[in-house]
Image (tube, grey):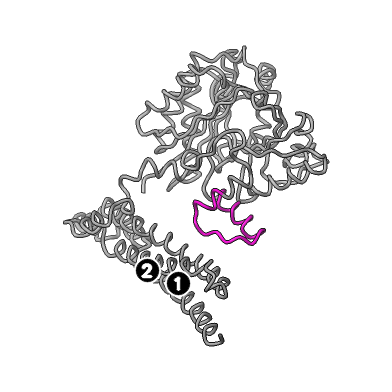
């Protein structure tokens, strides 16, 4: 499967539509880049762009965007609520699919070097690409912001990683790096900027200083006021949503707001969010309130409702969840997107893939779907209410197995095609070295990691055991009536 990297450049312009569109156009025109989201903010005077593509393509897209911005953004005239130090303030690279953090570090280094050479501006590395520990944190590098940059550049400890230590008034400086997926998440309050900032100081990792650390690891925070929406916000960056989940930040801010008698009026995601972050949040509320929800779509809707993500504007999952955005651009080549007739004919075609692994996964997925169907047709009906508890336990594993097996339909064929592209068994034989060559070893690893028959059998046994166990309980219940 081709490597996919996300790039999220933040440009210091959120009010001039012509400038915003020009930068978006430069990204969209770059071969291999898919622009997923453009999120401007008037009060912050900042626009967050999100695009994906192969590693080399996203580097080119970011450079093209910077080239366009250089001619039309003047930092000497910039004002806004968000901390900033440059026209292209920050440009992180994030692994999405089949890409590693090392791939993204390489992207950041290439981008930083080429940007500095192209525009003759100072560039700093942060996050996983940082050359020293004191430059890992973006707020540390950006301390003092644009206004302090002339003095900072004169200090040897703040020499840029790329480019001259020269103050370019129209541009400032750019920070680039590699990181995990960051969620830009803001909670709305009917309060003052100062009250929102007070809460932000308590929850962010930095806290109020070394002697008063905040409550959450990997969370940055600030309070500000959105004039266009007439609300204050506790604005956060969640740097590791698996360590500090979305719902934890929201619930803690709500708790602090209640203590200050401040109403919370929803929240806001800026840019895109990973599906896992949404589903983790849904699972929290499902467990907390003892709900029964298995459909992914319903879980997403639950989170939108609980967090009030549509309070400042519509939250459309297909336009805000990164996996949905990527899938929308790539559905055409997926086996599971074919009609049943097309899939069967593709199996019968004169090609080795899709083959047995994909077929067995598809059949097993249908079997799991039948189990799910029976459970859903039983649950919630008055005549079967005595077994509702059993159905609550039975439906989720069948539903999950159905989804997991559908993924294997494509994964098996992808692994086989990768094996053949690397030469398969033929290349080593042609070279007279059997499969001991590097391509041969890579081919064997590709096949070994393929999730075909073995994974299907394992998943099938799991749901069979689940079905037999819960089925026995249903039969016992019927006998005891």
Among all residues in the image, which is located at the extreme front? Answer: 382
Callout 2: SS: helix
Q: Position of residue 195 (x, y in %)?
A: 79, 33
- Residue 463, numbered label: 1
Residues at marks 1 and 2 touching, judged by CB atoms closer than 8 Å: yes
Q: Residues within 10 Å of mark 1 (few under 14, many from 20)?
A: many
Q: Main secondary structure of the magenta part?
A: helix
Q: Indicate whether 353 appears above or below 313.
A: below
Q: Residues within 10 Å of mark 2 (few under 14, many from 20)?
A: some
Q: Quadrant of residue 365?
A: bottom left
Residue 79, magenta (yes or no): no
192 lies left or right of 308: right
Q: Indicate whether 376 appears above or below 231.
A: below
Read off the residue under disc 2. 367
Disc nearer the start of the sequence (1/2): 2
Camera-nearest residue between 217 and 469: 469
Magenta segment boundaries in residue numbering:
278-301
169 lies left or right of 68: right
Q: Nearer the viewer, mark 1 or mark 2?
A: 2
Callout 1: SS: helix
Among all residues in the image, which is located at the extreme bottom? Answer: 479
The residue positioned 55% from the left and 24% from the top of the image is 11
Q: CA distance from mark 1 to mark 2?
A: 10 Å
Q: Position of residue 62 (x, y in %)?
A: 46, 28
93 lies left or right of 265: left
- Residue 413: tell me if it is visible: yes
Camera-nearest residue between 45 and 259: 259
Camera-nearest residue between 39 and 202: 39
Quadrant showing the C terminus:
bottom right
Camera-nearest residue between 66 and 469: 469
232 lies left or right of 391: right
């Amino acid at each position: 499967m081709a490597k996919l990297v996300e790039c999220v450049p933040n440009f210091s312009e959120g009010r001039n539509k012509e400038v915003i569109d020009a930068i978006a156009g430069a990204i969209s025109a770059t071969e291999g880049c898919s622009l997923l989201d453009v999120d401007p903010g008037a009060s912050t005077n900042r626009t967050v762009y999100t695009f994906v593509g192969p590693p080399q393509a996203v580097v080119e897209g970011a450079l093209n965007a910077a080239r366009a911005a250089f001619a039309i953004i003047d930092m000497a005239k910039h004002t806004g609520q968000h901390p900033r130090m440059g026209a292209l303030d920050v440009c992180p690279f994030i692994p999405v699919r089949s890409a590693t953090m090392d791939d993204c570090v390489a992207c950041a280094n290439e981008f930083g070097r080429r940007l500095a050479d192209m525009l003759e501006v100072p560039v700093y590395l942060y996050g996983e690409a940082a050359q020293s520990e004191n430059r890992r944190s973006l707020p540390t590098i950006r301390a003092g912001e644009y206004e302090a940059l002339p003095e900072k550049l004169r200090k040897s400890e703040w020499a840029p990683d790329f480019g001259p230590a020269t103050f370019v008034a129209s541009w400032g400086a750019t920070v680039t790096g590699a990181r995990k997926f960051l969620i830009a998440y803001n909670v709305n309050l009917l309060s003052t900027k100062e009250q929102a900032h007070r809460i932000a100081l308590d929850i962010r990792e930095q806290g109020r200083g070394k002697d008063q650390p905040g409550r959450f690891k990997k969370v940055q925070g600030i309070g500000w006021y959105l004039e266009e929406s007439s609300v204050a916000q506790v604005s956060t960056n969640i740097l590791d949503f698996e360590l500090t989940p979305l719902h934890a930040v929201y619930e803690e801010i709500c708790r602090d707001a209640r203590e200050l008698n401040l109403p919370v009026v929803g929240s806001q995601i800026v840019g895109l969010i990973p599906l896992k972050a949404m589903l983790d949040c849904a699972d929290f509320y499902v467990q907390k309130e003892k709900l029964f929800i298995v459909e992914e779509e319903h879980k997403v809707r639950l989170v939108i409702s609980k967090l009030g993500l549509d309070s400042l504007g519509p939250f459309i999952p297909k336009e805000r969840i990164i996996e949905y955005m990527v899938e929308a651009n790539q559905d055409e080549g997926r086996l599971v997107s074919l009609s049943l007739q097309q899939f069967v004919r593709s199996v019968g075609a004169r090609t080795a893939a899709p083959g047995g692994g994909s077929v067995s996964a598809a059949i097993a997925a249908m079997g799991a779907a039948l189990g799910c169907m029976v459970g859903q047709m039983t649950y919630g009906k008055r005549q079967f209410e005595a077994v509702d508890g059993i159905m609550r336990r039975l439906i989720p594993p069948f539903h999950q197995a159905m989804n997991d097996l559908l993924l294997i339909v494509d994964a098996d064929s992808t692994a086989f095609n990768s094996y053949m592209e690397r030469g398969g068994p033929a290349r080593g034989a042609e070279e007279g070295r059997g499969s001991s060559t590097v391509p041969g070893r890579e081919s064997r690893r590709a096949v070994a990691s393929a999730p075909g028959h073995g994974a299907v059998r394992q998943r099938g046994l799991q749901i069979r055991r689940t079905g037999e166990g819960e089925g026995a309980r249903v039969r016992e219940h019927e006998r005891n009536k």
